[in-house]
Amino acid sequence: PTSKEISETIEGLGGVLNAATDRELTTYWCKVPSTHFQLALDVLADIIHEPLFDPEEVEKERHVILEELSMSYDIPSYRADMLIDEVMWPDQPLGRDVGGSRESVTAITRDMLMQYMQRQYTLPNLVVSIAGNIPHEEAAEAVDLHFRDWTNHKPGTWFPVEDDQSAPRMSMERRKTEQAHICIAVKGLSSTDPDRYALDILNAMLGEGMSSRLFLELREKQSLVYDVHTTTSHLKDCGSFIAYAGVDPKNARKAVGSILHELHLIKEAVPKEELHKAREYLKGRLVLRMEDSRSVAAWLGAQELLHDEVQTVEQVLAKVDSITTEDIQRVATSLLVTEKLSAAIVGPFRSDKAFQAQLRI
């Protein structure tokens, strides 16, 4: 088969076929009308079970990935995202771009790809997650048919995070851009930490949506930015909280100061009304996300693969409901500290000294 034949098989049904690589898992996914479930599973199983790895196609894909990396490096906001990971997690896999570097992608051989598949693509390292109008018995029989002959050896291990940060860190990349792209971050919480939901609510308060603190302060009140937001990540043994803003370079220091000030303020007081709004925001987004069958499959599969158990939506909603204002302040006080601050800035600046002097909460 060719890539054209594979894509036409799924797209000819009105379906979508794709894959994604993240820091902890690789996902191959397909979404089709439920009447075509068997064909879709057959295609996915063939892709990951019997790949051709034609040398010519490997070289083509290498060039595609190199172009993807070039695109990422050309977009300043993407570059700021890469830099903040390097600053937070230096000299370890977590601090490197998931897509690799031009040097690493150029050096990968077909044999390396085959060895990786033989090591990692094994039954103990596989979860097949299915969501849709499919009887359980039919799904189980189909999965068994396609995957029963897979190897059953133990996959390679993961790389635990190393964190020895005890003072603020910063990285700056000078570019002649119209905007300065700013990321300010602290270490967060793992996916199994009981306080992760308190951090998620804190994140919603600070930087999710047009009624969040940073949006109201930096955009609505000060008119400094078009885009300002925060994100959290929860990984196996660590996490992050990152604030991003794109701003006119002449206002960059003011924006950094305003972000840090808001991080300081939220440690002091959290009104119950604000907690209620953020809590309902978080719950509503989760419930709405679960209306999409692909999101349901991803929700189930990631939990099963990474944690060997699956929380229901109702269980998570109950945990979110249990968060109090005291929980928010405790987590904020614990995480939003000067010694764990990291910053990355891409913009037309000759020196980072003025910004470094600002890094304190």
Image: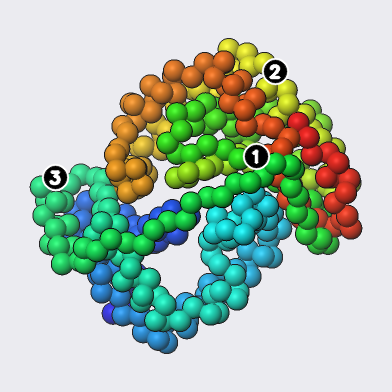
Between residues 99 and 251, which one lies in front from this camera angle?
99
Identified at 68% across, 39% down, the residue is 340
Q: Earlier in the sequence, mark 3 or mark 2?
A: 3
The label nearer to you, 3 versus 2, is 2
Residue sticking out furthest to the bottom: 56
Q: Earlier in the sequence, mark 1 or mark 3?
A: 3
Between residues 204 and 335, which one lies in front from this camera angle?
335
Residue marked by disc 2:
268
Badges 3 and 2: C-beta atoms under 8 Å apart?
no
Residue marked by disc 3:
135
**Horizontal arrangement in the rendering, residue 33 relative to residue 220 (left or right):** left
Identified at 68% across, 27% down, the residue is 213
Q: Is residue 330 visible?
A: yes
Between residues 215 and 171, which one lies in front from this camera angle?
171
Between residues 80 and 293, which one lies in front from this camera angle?
80
Residue marked by disc 1:
186
**Horizontal arrangement in the rendering, residue 159 relative to residue 314 (left or right):** right
Classify mark 3: residues with Cα within 10 Å, few (<14), some (14-19) or many (20+).
few
